């Protein structure tokens, strides 16, 4: 080997390259790829697998049980660290690779970085077709990994060792770019992984990727200032970009100075502490009454780091003021231009700081402040009603489970959820006490996310109490990483709510004329429908069989005690509770468009269509 080169396999070179990549923002440096999750098969065991053994001194390895779950864990890790550090995931060719697709979509939808390293066919084609290879009759270069193209922000198939150099550099560039980040895929043919090459030493030099904070354009800033000064009923919609940019203090300063209230998306909740006078809680279909009331009358909506999903806009029916205009502050131009808005294409923290400075002395009318604060107080009484049980010896409802957890958690705890009926209850009711406490994956709303994501969060924040909240439907989809939590000694807490089926979709099915078909976990009745007795499953026993400590709680008092015990434990702990199905959550304050059958023979669907037609008439296109 010459002085200027190092002879390594392609996989070894990739691992050593990744180990010396760093991000830097505000003078703080972090490893970009802090570890690698992996499940090994013939497509990666002799390549990346061997490289991880060879390079164990520089690259931590984490053993997963399900490929999709490994991506979820990596995403949870990246989100907890505000996208400044990420993890890689390696799999074999075939099923292992295609199992990555759901996790990759989740990462890209939520703008969260994860590096995917699936094995691939032989680049040399000497073994063709190999085990698990997809043979396409007219496109010989296609493999199952091509399913990752549409859900990746960057994709490349590394068919020669030297091709890794530009590909790896582009991969980490995208991962570290706050405007471009998401899932990044490097498909690695298994023969190329094991092939040796003389790599230039410069490839292994430390690289620091500066995470920029672009400032707003002066012309756009001046127009934004003019729009805010002219508004009489402005409202901020805080999205996930506030957290990613660590702009919470800048948002607080903006709200304190101007008196403009702040409502939050699922990703943005916690941008202001729940007891800040300007914090109105969630907005949209799962929002609070005060947020949605203000949204309907707002004349200026200031979106900060939000994608404006259909839940946020109530499917285009929420912002009803005829004169409403939008001002969007976003690091991504694609999102900034939504709803025909005035734009500030910039970092959220930098943009808010400059906007606050430029608005010096401006404040909304105090009558407006008094009105929304009164609305906030009214909603707090709604929260208390939903949280509190009249009898501590009663079986808790789902919202009372949240109330018991609210009594136990501290400011530093992290509460994780993604799908089912819990996201709606949490968005309306949860009192977020710190920027990282409320961890809702609602961009993709992926069932099965919570448990593996809890592992990633726990890795990113050791010593922090982490709670994964799941219903029985979500639990049954992906409990596998409980084994990993036990193996790694990660003391995550699982709150497992048994309600015998898909509660959220059951309610939606009933509302849209589907009559709750296929949404309950029950035996078949004599007529063939799933309306018999609940299935005799014991999910608590299942969690225990995977290595968790399990506490069964039957009453509100027992639940509160169980949660306190779980928080104090240094072991992975499951609190299992079967809830009273009686609805105690406040109803939706805004609509959500789920199309209903236009013609039907069943009365339930006919009535649902009548309700749908009445609601859809309120939709607006903001042009």
Image (spheres, rainbow, N blue to C red):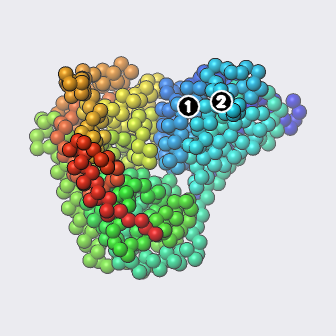
- Seen in the picture, residue 304 relative to 413 is either above or below; the reply is below
- Label at residue 280: none
x%, y% of residue 89? Answer: 58, 33
Residue shown at the point (22%, 67%) measured from the top left: 374
Q: Is residue 378 left or right of residue 120?
A: left
In-front residue for pair 398/454: 398
Residues at badges 1 and 2 in contact (C-beta under 8 Å)? no
Residue 439 can be seen, yes or no: no
Q: Position of residue 552 (x, y in %)?
A: 24, 27
Look at the numbered disc 1 and give the secondary structure of its residue.
helix
Q: Is residue 561 placed above or below 268 in the rendered structure?
A: above
In depth, the one of 128 and 168 nearer the eye is 128
Task: Please tell me which residue is depicted at 19% across the width and 48% down the height of the picture.
Answer: 386
Residue 277 percent location from the top left of the image = 30, 65
Name above or below for residue 558 compared with residue 311. above
For label 1, the crowd category at 10 Å Cα-Cα, with few meaning under 14, some 14 to 19 and many 20 or more, is: some
Q: Quadrant of the N terminus?
A: top right
Name the residue tied to disc 2: 136
Can residue 174 be seen in this snapshot? yes
> Closer to the N terminus: mark 1 or mark 2?
1
> Which residue lies at the image location 59% right of the left edge and 72% below the top edge?
217
Question: For the point 35% across and 74% down, which residue is it?
Answer: 322
Q: Residues within 10 Å of mark 2 (few under 14, many from 20)?
A: few
> Disc 1 vs disc 2: which is toward the camera?
2
The secondary structure type at the circle numbered 2 is loop
Give the numbered dot on residue 98. 1
Residue 296, image x, y percentages? 31, 67
Find residue 350 and report its image quarter.
bottom right
């Amino acid at each position: 080997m010459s002085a200027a080169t190092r002879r390594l396999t392609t996989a070894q070179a990739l691992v050593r390259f990744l180990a010396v990549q760093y991000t830097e923002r505000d003078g703080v440096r972090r490893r970009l790829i802090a570890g690698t999750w992996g499940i090994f098969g013939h497509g990666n065991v002799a390549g990346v697998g061997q490289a991880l053994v060879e390079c164990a001194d520089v690259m931590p390895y984490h053993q997963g049980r399900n490929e999709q779950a490994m991506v979820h864990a990596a995403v949870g890790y990246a989100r907890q660290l505000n996208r400044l550090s990420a993890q890689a995931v390696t799999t074999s060719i075939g099923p292992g690779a295609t199992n990555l697709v759901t996790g990759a979509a989740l990462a890209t939808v939520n703008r969260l970085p994860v590096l995917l390293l699936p094995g691939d066919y032989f680049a040399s084609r000497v073994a063709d077709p190999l085990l698990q290879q997809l043979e396409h009759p007219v496109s010989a270069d296609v493999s199952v990994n091509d399913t990752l193209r549409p859900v990746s922000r960057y994709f490349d198939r590394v068919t020669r060792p030297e091709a890794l150099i530009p590909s790896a550099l582009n991969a980490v560039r995208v991962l570290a770019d706050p405007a471009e980040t998401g899932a990044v895929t490097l498909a690695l043919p298994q023969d190329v992984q094991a092939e040796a090459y003389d790599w230039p030493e410069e490839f292994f030099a430390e690289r620091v990727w500066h995470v920029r904070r672009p400032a707003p354009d002066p012309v756009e800033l001046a127009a934004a200032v003019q729009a805010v000064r002219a508004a009489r009923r402005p409202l901020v919609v805080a999205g996930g970009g506030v957290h990613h940019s660590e702009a919470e203090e800048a948002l607080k300063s903006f709200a304190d100075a101007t008196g403009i209230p702040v409502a939050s998306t699922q990703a943005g909740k916690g941008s202001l502490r729940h007891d800040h006078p300007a914090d109105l809680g969630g907005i949209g279909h799962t929002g609070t009454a005060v947020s949605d009331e203000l949204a309907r009358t707002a004349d200026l909506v200031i979106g900060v780091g939000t994608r404006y999903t259909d839940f946020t806009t109530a499917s285009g029916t929420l912002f009803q003021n005829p004169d409403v205009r939008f001002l969007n502050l976003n690091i991504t131009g694609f999102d900034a231009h939504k709803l025909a808005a005035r734009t500030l294409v910039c970092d959220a923290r930098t943009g808010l700081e400059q906007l606050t400075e430029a608005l010096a002395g401006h404040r909304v009318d105090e009558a407006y402040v008094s009105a929304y604060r009164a609305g906030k107080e009214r909603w707090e009484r709604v929260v208390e009603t939903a949280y509190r049980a009249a009898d501590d010896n009663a079986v808790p409802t789902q919202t009372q489970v949240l109330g018991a957890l609210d009594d136990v958690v501290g400011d530093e705890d992290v509460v994780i959820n993604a799908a089912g009926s819990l996201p709606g209850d949490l968005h309306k009711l949860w009192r977020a006490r710190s920027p990282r406490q409320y961890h809702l994956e609602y961009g993709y709303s992926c069932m099965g996310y919570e448990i593996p994501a809890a592992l990633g969060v726990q890795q990113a924040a050791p010593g922090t109490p982490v709670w994964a909240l799941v219903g029985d439907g979500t639990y049954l989809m992906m409990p596998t990483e409980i084994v990993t939590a036990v193996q790694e000694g990660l003391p995550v807490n699982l709150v497992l709510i048994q309600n015998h089926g898909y509660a959220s979709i059951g309610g939606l099915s009933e509302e849209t004329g589907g009559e709750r078909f296929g949404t309950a976990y029950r035996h078949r009745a004599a007529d063939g429908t799933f309306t018999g007795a609940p299935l005799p499953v014991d999910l608590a026993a299942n969690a225990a069989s995977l290595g968790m400590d399990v506490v069964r709680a039957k009453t509100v008092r027992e639940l509160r005690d169980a949660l306190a015990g779980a928080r104090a434990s240094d072991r992975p702990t499951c609190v299992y509770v079967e809830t009273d199905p009686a609805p105690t959550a406040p109803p939706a304050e805004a609509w959500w468009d789920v199309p209903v059958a236009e013609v039907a023979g069943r009365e339930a669907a006919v009535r649902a269509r009548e309700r749908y037609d009445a609601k859809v008439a309120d939709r607006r296109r903001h042009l």
